[in-house]
Image (spheres, helix red, strand yellow):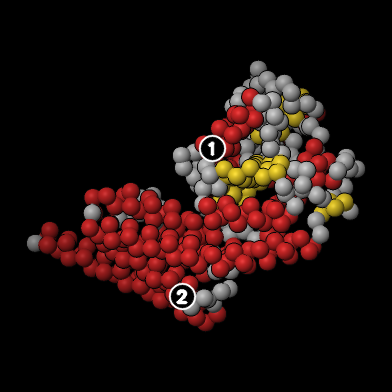
């Protein structure tokens, strides 16, 4: 089996969280990547890609982008890469990275042309496996009047806008082996299949490999990447405490300025997403558990009353306890007790909310 080397491969990483961005860069360098372009958000990535196009540069061999960013998120960046004339390579492998790995988010990423989806929290091994997936199993690209992107038939799903896509046999499609000229099909029933050479595998292997041949990295390299993440966990505690401090500030503001709670809960949800995505990466899976609970309870349309603010504060207290006591893994009995206490606190606030609503109804009826 071939041993892949990534020093010949260029990769663009787009992540708005500075701590995560630095950590992911460290992991990639541990894997052997040397040509790494780091971007703070989708807008910076697009500006960078436009300059590469103007310089007649083929662009990065691979893009990894976080889903939730501002002002341009990973979904919009992916759509731009697949559709814009200014992009240097419309078929660049695109890995979407996000702590929101729910089916709706994964589906949206695929609908817009993402090649793969990497869920946070990630480990050295999960990043490695996702890279191998992209390198060893490249997808042909599909173009019809409504969609351009990686073929989704591996998942037995049609591309967006073509519900009977799987009924069309490959021999009935137009197969294209070069991506130099891309013209949208004129007829609604026409489907183009793009099957370029696996240039990414050739770069990693240092030459063309036989059909079906796979590659790997030395096990020691993966272990070293995991050790890198373990060392980063020391910095994660401070980073997480800063986010918990921000959540506490938002709770205080929400109680003092009830008229601005919608915006405050939007930010609470964004911070919860960050905590959900990173806890497990740095050895604190309970932070990811509590972060997900807070993320789900602060979604758009959630209640914005005082009880909901107290529920947010209960989540903050639980996560602070995890960091203070350095509770790693699932926490054993202590972890179970923390989860039970949080759920009890949530139930208490919901009962208080119901009692208050009943009282208001009784007063209105009287």
**Residue 7 visible in rendering:** yes
Judge left or right: residue 261 versus residue 37. left
Above or below 173: residue 33? below
Residue furthest to the bottom in view is 333
- Label 2: state its secondary structure: helix
- Quarter occupied by residue 331: bottom right
Q: Nearer the viewer, residue 102 or 246?
A: 246
Name the residue tied to disc 1. Answer: 44
Specify few, some or many for label 2: CA neighbours under 10 Å numbering under 14, 14-19, or 20 or more: few
Q: CA distance from mark 1 to mark 2?
A: 37 Å
Quadrant where the C terminus sits is: bottom left
Number of marks in picture = 2
Q: Nearer the viewer, residue 297 or 2?
A: 2
Above or below 182: residue 252? below
Residue at 69% across, 53% down: 28
Residue at 80% across, 56% down: 217
Q: Earlier in the sequence, mark 1 or mark 2?
A: 1
Judge left or right: residue 156 versus residue 108. right
- Label 1: state its secondary structure: helix
Q: Position of residue 146 (x, y in %)?
A: 60, 28
Residue at 70% across, 44% down: 35
Q: Position of residue 144 (x, y in %)?
A: 65, 26
Q: Position of residue 135 (x, y in %)?
A: 77, 45
Q: Position of residue 114 (x, y in %)?
A: 63, 41
Q: Nearer the viewer, residue 82 or 234?
A: 234
Specify few, some or many for label 1: CA neighbours under 10 Å numbering under 14, 14-19, or 20 or more: some
Name the residue tied to disc 2. Answer: 324
């Amino acid at each position: 089996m071939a041993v892949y080397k990534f020093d010949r491969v260029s990769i663009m990483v787009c992540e708005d969280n500075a701590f995560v961005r630095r950590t992911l860069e460290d992991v990639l360098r541990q894997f052997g990547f040397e040509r790494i372009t780091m971007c703070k958000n989708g807008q910076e990535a697009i500006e960078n890609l436009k300059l590469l196009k103007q310089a007649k540069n083929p662009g990065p061999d691979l893009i990894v982008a976080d889903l939730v960013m501002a002002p341009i998120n990973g979904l919009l960046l992916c759509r731009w890469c697949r559709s814009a004339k200014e992009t240097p390579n419309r078929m660049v492998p695109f890995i979407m990275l996000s702590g929101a790995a729910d089916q709706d988010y994964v589906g949206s990423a695929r609908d817009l042309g993402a090649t793969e989806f990497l869920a946070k929290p990630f480990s050295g091994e999960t990043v490695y496996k996702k890279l191998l997936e992209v390198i060893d199993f490249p997808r042909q690209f599909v173009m019809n009047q409504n969609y351009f992107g990686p073929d989704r038939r591996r998942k037995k799903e049609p591309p967006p806008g073509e519900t009977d896509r799987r009924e069309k046999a490959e021999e009935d499609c137009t197969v294209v082996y070069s991506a130099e000229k891309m013209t949208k099909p004129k007829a609604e029933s026409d489907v183009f299949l793009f099957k370029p050479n696996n240039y990414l595998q050739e770069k990693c292997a240092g030459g063309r490999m036989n059909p079906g041949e796979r590659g790997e990295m030395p096990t020691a390299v993966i272990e070293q990447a995991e050790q890198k993440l373990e060392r980063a966990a020391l910095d994660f505690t401070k980073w997480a405490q800063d986010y918990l401090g921000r959540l506490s500030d938002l709770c205080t503001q929400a109680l003092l300025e009830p008229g601005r709670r919608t915006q405050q809960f939007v930010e609470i949800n964004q911070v919860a997403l960050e905590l959900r995505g990173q806890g497990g990466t740095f050895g604190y899976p309970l932070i990811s558990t509590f972060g997900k609970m807070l993320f789900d309870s602060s979604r758009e349309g959630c209640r914005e009353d005082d009880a909901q603010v107290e529920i947010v504060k209960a989540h903050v207290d639980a996560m602070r306890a995890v960091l203070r006591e350095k509770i790693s893994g699932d926490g054993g009995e202590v972890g179970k007790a923390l989860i039970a206490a949080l759920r009890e606190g949530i139930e208490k606030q919901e009962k208080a909310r119901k009692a208050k609503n009943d009282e208001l109804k009784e007063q209105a009826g009287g």
